[in-house]
């Protein structure tokens, strides 16, 4: 079964718009990756400053290939000194295996 990676980002209120714009600008960067299945950026509604970046992959190897290649390159930015300040003040990666799955009838 698939694996899920959830990047838990602490984002101060003044950086929310910046974070969302950055994800929108590179939203298609992951969709062509081998083994990629799903992406969602989850915005907090109340009581927290935590965003969740949900990605789903065919297997751990597919995620690793993306994380060690295209994702790493995207986060390195331009020449020295040109990299923008991170919008998140903290980040934690959670990893899960899909144990059960239910899809809508007729899908």
Image: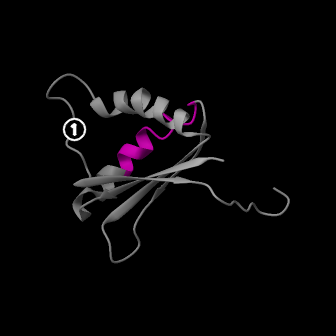
Left or right: 31 as drawn, with respect to 24: right
Quarter of the image where one finds residue 73: top left
Q: Secondary structure at mark 1?
A: loop
Left or right: 63 as drawn, with respect to 99: left
In-front residue for pair 44/62: 62
Query: Which residue, as the protein is rendered here, is positioned at the far bottom?
Result: 47
The residue depicted at 53 percent of the width and 33 percent of the height is 61
Residue hosting label 1:
84
The residue depicted at 56 percent of the width and 36 percent of the height is 31
The residue depicted at 60 percent of the width and 35 percent of the height is 35
State the image coordinates of residue 103 (x, y, percent, origin top left). Answer: 75, 60
Left or right: 104 as drawn, with respect to 98: right
Q: How is the image coloured?
A: one colour
Q: Is residue 55 above or below residue 49?
A: above
Residue 30 on the magenta segment = yes
Residue 65 on the magenta segment = no
State the image coordinates of residue 94 (x, y, percent, origin top left). Answer: 42, 54
Tally the numbered discs.
Answer: 1
Q: Read off the magenta span.
A: 20-33
In-front residue for pair 73/93: 93
Q: Is residue 87 above or below residue 74?
A: below
């Amino acid at each position: 079964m698939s694996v899920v990676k959830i990047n838990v980002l602490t984002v101060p209120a003044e950086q929310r718009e910046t974070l969302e714009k950055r994800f929108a600008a590179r939203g298609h960067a992951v969709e062509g990756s081998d083994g990629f299945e799903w992406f969602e950026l989850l915005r907090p509604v109340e009581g927290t400053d935590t965003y969740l970046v949900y990605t789903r992959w065919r297997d751990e190897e597919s995620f690793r290939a993306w994380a060690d290649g295209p994702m790493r390159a995207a986060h390195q930015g331009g020449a020295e000194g040109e990299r923008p300040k991170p919008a998140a003040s903290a980040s934690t990666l959670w990893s899960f295996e899909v144990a059960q799955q239910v899809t809508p009838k007729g899908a």
